[in-house]
Amino acid sequence: MTASPAIDEHALVRKITWRIIPFVFILYIISYIDRANIGYAALQMNHELALTGEAFGFASGIFFIGYFLFEVPSNVMLNRFGARVWIARILVTWGMVSVGSAFVQNATQLYVLRFLLGVAEAGFFPGIIVYLTYWFRARELATTVALFTAAIPVSYIIGAPLSTWVMDHAQWLNWSGWRWMLVLEGAPALIGGVLCFFYLTDRPADAKWLKPHEREWLQGELANDRKARPHAKHFGSLKAMTNPKVLYLSFIYFVYQCGSLGVGYWMPQIIKGFSRTLSHTQIGLIAMIPYLAATIAMVLWSRSSDRRNERRLHSAIPLGVAALALLGAGLATNPYVSIVMISLSLAGLYAFKSPFWALPTLFLSRSTAAVSIAVINSVGNLGGFVGPFAIGFIKGTGKSATPGLLFLSALLVASFLMAYFIRIDEPGTDDATGAVPNHSH
């Protein structure tokens, strides 16, 4: 493909990137703070609501049951109403539920609100991923997705000290700090929903902020991009949900989420176990360290994946690193070694994300990818229930998170092997697993 002489290709891609990515990046930070702040709330909330380890693990994970049940319907609605309207709806409803969570008085009410938070937020992440495919070519996708999903570790970098600082200092109206934290961190989603409605543009054809010849060039490039993938398949929603390769990717993502969210939700309490003298704010500052490492690893690894145009090994290797690091974290007795191992594990887990989300676009058409990415994300996110609950259950019986971390490490070894032997970006791979024998490409 040759660019039009009137178009500076790199400048236009940069213009589109700056228009879209910073905004959705901020929205995703808000999203992850609202779903993950329960980990910090637990430092006060568990005592106030008399939650056991199992109860907290269940409350953390039930979010993903609601998320799973409503993920695919939400993406079907996104296709019907358009990204701008539907993503705005998602933001407003999850903001309302997040603020409402501050008023819970017992474990049952917490379970209900966490479930409803998952229902409200369902469809946001895959919706944004599909939205990005409306604006960016395949060659830019891993880096673009990385710039967006880097919001996840950044949300922990911001959320860890912010959440714990609010808990230590907001004590107004005889309300606990964790309740104020949920209110103050839920409100930005309501504001973001209104801004989303007025700011996002559904498709390039509607972009008044692009010049006519820029819109024409971009639409032509995206059309050529689709033609360049003749093996990309298109099929209906039900077939996408039962496609063997989609289910294969779903299981890899399920195991990944077990590890990532199992560590993420329990890390504040793991750090608290290092010393009885740590304040909530100090715990939050220490919790920033692994996510700083994860952010750097995520961006550098995705650039490597785009530069080499390689997705399989760039998805598999980080899972292997994370498995070994979680094994080290589970066996470590020194707090400093534990933080290094947790940092290394999260660096691997987050580096995996962007190359992995580029995989479905290699064998699916864009319209089918909307449903398929939702299936992968929703089935995979059930791991967000299993991981935190498994650690809570194991910790509840043995009072130590170590066996839970070793369990997650073993699961990640399985996902590493599945990612390593996957084969979906070549024609003629419609077998039941999508796996390739002992050779690579």
Image: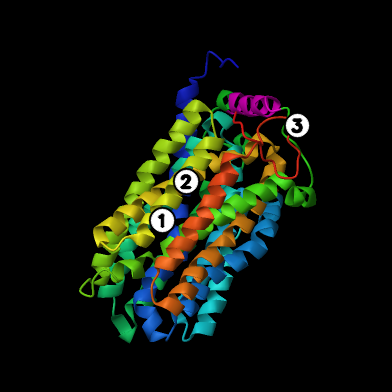
Where does the image place residue 96, in percent across and percent down from the top left?
A: 51, 70
**Residue 317, magenta (yes or no):** no
Image position of 220 with respect to 402: above or below:
above
Span of residues in magenta: 215-229
Where does the image place residue 230, in percent across and percent down from the top left?
A: 73, 27
Label 3 Cα neighbours within 10 Å, binned few <14 / some 14-19 / many ≥20: few
Where does the image place residue 181, in percent across and percent down from the top left?
A: 36, 71
Amino acid residing under circle 2: Gly
Q: Which label's residue is closer to the chain start, 2 or 1?
A: 2
- Give the labeled residue for mark 2: 320
Where does the image place residue 194, in percent across and percent down from the top left?
A: 51, 57
Q: In the depicted view, which residue is nearer to us: 120 or 65?
A: 65
Q: Which label's residue is closer to the chain start, 2 or 3?
A: 2
The Cα–Cα distance between marks 2 and 3, rounded to whole angstroms, is: 28 Å
Q: Is residue 213 visible?
A: yes
- Give the labeled residue for mark 3: 428
Rendered residue at 71%/42% (across/down): 367
Residue 326 bears which disc, if any?
A: 1
Amino acid residing under circle 1: Leu
Tag nearer the camera, 1 or 3? 1
